[in-house]
Image (tube, helix red, strand yellow):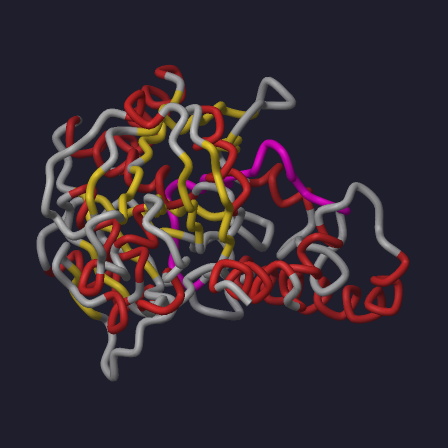
Amino acid sequence: MPPSTTCSSRTEEGFGARLQELWYRRRLAPALWPLLPLEGLFCGLSALRRLAYGYGLLRVHRCAVPVIVVGNITVGGTGKTPLVARLAVLLREAGYRPGIVSRGYGGGASQWPQAVNGASDPQSVGDEPVLLARTTGCPVMAGPDRVAAADALVQQGVDAIISDDGLQHYRLGRSVEIAVLDGERRAGNGHCLPAGPLRERTNRLDKVDWVVVNGEPASDREQCMTFVPGRLHRIDGSEGERPLKDWTGKRVHAVAGIGHPERFFAMLKRAGMEVTPHPFADHYPYGPSDLAFGDHRPVVMTEKDAVKCRLFAQPHWWSVPVRAELDSVFETGLLQQIDNKR
């Protein structure tokens, strides 16, 4: 069996991928009906936890600087990390010294929190913190305890904090809440875990400050976010950049270990590439054999995947950076809101 088939089957035919496919149908699939009692238990416990923090039964930690929480109410990729990167740049351009808190998912460090820079080991601190440090140049602190990570950033002198994927981490107090939705998949079947993809009921969106949609907004309250691909980079650093237009008509292996790989593959197809897709699980820990596809066609992957492949990258492996673009009215309103929280 060719390596590419092996890689694809590992995700496409896996239990997790099948479950997400069922979750993101518009109606509850019969196969998920037995999970409805567990959904009720999950939602009840989630609501009780939120109320406990709201009424002061569980302590909320308030940082000395404004905290912007970026998260979602669904399982799977919505585009949070590019949004966090854009907000960090926006704050820096406005005169702030922002820092970023990330959970460090997949990192195997023995002690947390961990200060992260662009040269940090993703196996130790996680892939997303390294990507954020590399793309923003801002201080990044990774760790499962977001309060400890935020306090460590304050001690470094930051004057604003962005928490990546922290909407349900209520122990960390927040000045601004931003929820991100996938414009295509949205709330899926509308059910909570494990019967559906929701971490919280959709009415949670009524309580956040901003709803940002990766795609087409469905109401005036939703803010539009679009991704703009940049120039491709050779992952091993052996050559400079190449514009996306140079890749029109090229046959490539496309690799994506993110929450919604199809979005990345569709972007490459819109750029005119002939794509052989290889979806992997989110945060997948790549090894050289995973990307040995048996030919010398270019391998094109996300930046998040690339940070884990640099040490064993081949000359024909490339990454595509993406930049989040936001409406200027949203950016201005957000800055004003943060200024008022100082």
214 vs 231, nearest the viewer: 231
The percent coordinates of residue 123 (x first, y second) are 27, 71
Q: In the drawing, does residue 228 fall left or right of residue 45? A: left
Q: Is residue 112 above or below residue 199?
A: below
255 vs 108, nearest the viewer: 255
The residue at the point 20 percent across, 29 percent down is: 242
The residue at the point 37 percent across, 37 percent down is: 83
Q: For residue 14, what is the image quadrant? A: bottom right
Q: Main secondary structure of the magenta part?
A: loop
Rendered-image quadrant of the C terminus: top left
Q: In the drawing, does residue 11 fall left or right of residue 229? A: right
The residue at the point 82 percent across, 68 percent down is: 35
The residue at the point 29 percent across, 35 percent down is: 87
Residues in magenta? Answer: 171-189
161 vs 190, nearest the viewer: 190
Q: In the drawing, does residue 262 fall left or right of residue 126? A: right
The percent coordinates of residue 105 (x first, y second) are 38, 66
The percent coordinates of residue 238 (x first, y second) are 10, 47
Residue 267 in the magenta stretch? The answer is no
Q: Residue furthest bottom?
A: 110
Q: In the drawing, does residue 335 fall left or right of residue 237? A: right
Rendered-image quadrant of the N terminus: bottom right
Q: For residue 339, what is the image quadrant? A: top left
The percent coordinates of residue 295 (x first, y second) are 37, 53
What number of labels is visible? 0
